[in-house]
Image: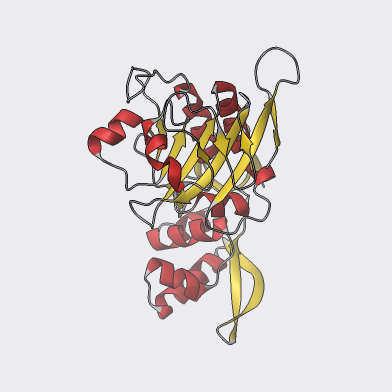
Amino acid sequence: MPRILRNEKNPEEIIESEDLEEEKIKALSDSTRRKILEILAEEPAYPLEVARELDLEKQKIYYHFQKLEDAELIEDDHEEKVSGGSATFYRSTAPGYLIDLGAEGEKFFSAATSENVKKFLQPMLDSGEIQGNIVVGSPEEHGPDRVQARDGHLAGEVALKLGGYGQKNSPVVKLDTEVFRDESFDENMVLIGGVLTNTVTKKFNDDFPVSFEGENFPYREIRTPESSYSEDAIGIIAKTENPEDPEKSVFMIAGVRNSGTEAAVLAFKNLEDILDNYSRGEFYRIVRGLDLDGDGDIDDFEVVE
């Protein structure tokens, strides 16, 4: 019987799960089959495609697929022409599975649902794991402008969003000063804050499809291919290839001022609504924060470009 679980990493998300019966547990005792199921939970795939991803021989992948199908952990999704032939794509039979231990259950794994968001987060999202870090400005005076960042608390909201799509065992948040100290620029990164408060954002500013204008304090203008913006509540969500390693990506969540950064974080939490039909490569959205209830805090946003 399906059960509804609350995602502990993203309390706003609920997951329909299935109990893992003895036959299913036996099938998943093999680590290769668990990896296959995780891949199919993200999106349907055909056996040879999964074999290439896991570097497995053809005979072995069909053996594992048969075991998973016999245990009713996977099922046919559709057929499609691939390389001149017809391939059967499989999917997992449930978004998540639960080992029932009595009073409390242990979630085996869960899968988020938006394919657009998964594509957008790649390569930071890889096979259900977060490969990279959120970088925030140091709260201490730092950088050429000797500023103190005040938006570090927003990293928790971004981490919750990422946690709905993948797991990360090591700490996910770094200070910009740590990145400079370690010279760890060749990673997947989500940068929170503009060029004034986050020195890593300043380093990569010119590599994004939109950027903060000006070489000197206080950098209060955002320029896009279409326009320029200087309102306090204007924010950016952008993605670009990491120039230090083309296999990695850098994401920027920032604003003209703090209210703009808050608007950008709110938009990031609602990526499903702003990505349209994202495929790959560079991306940006300009958003404007809104205070609909008049309490002085940003509680909604609108896309302006």
Q: Nearer the viewer, residue 83 or 42?
A: 83
Specify the farthest residue to the top: 295
What is the quadrant of residue 271 in the picture? top right
Give percent across and percent down for residue 155: 47, 29
Which of the 4 image quarters holds residue 237?
Answer: top right
Instruction: Judge left or right: residue 294 versus residue 263.
Output: right
- Asked whether residue 103 is in view, the answer is no
Residue at the image position 50 percent from the left and 70 percent from the top: 65
Q: Is residue 185 left or right of residue 279?
A: left
Q: Residue furthest bottom?
A: 84
Q: Where does the image place residue 183, in percent across and percent down from the top left? A: 25, 40
In what quadrant of the picture does the C terminus appear?
A: top right
* Above/below status of 16 relative to 39: above
Of residues 68 and 39, the one nearer the viewer is 39
Residue at 47% over, 62% down? 36
Res. 182 in view: yes
Expressed as whole percent of the image width and height from the top left, the position of residue 151 reads 48, 22
Front residue of 288/271: it is 288
Q: Residue furthest right?
A: 293
**Which residue is painted at 45% across and 55% down in the image?**
127
In this picture, is 119 found above or below 50?
A: above
Residue that lies at the very extreme toward the left in this rendered image: 182
The number of discs equals 0
69 relative to 11, above or below: below
* Colouring method of the image: secondary structure
Q: Report x, y in % for residue 243.
A: 37, 52
Of the pair 182 and 65, the residue shown nearer to us: 182
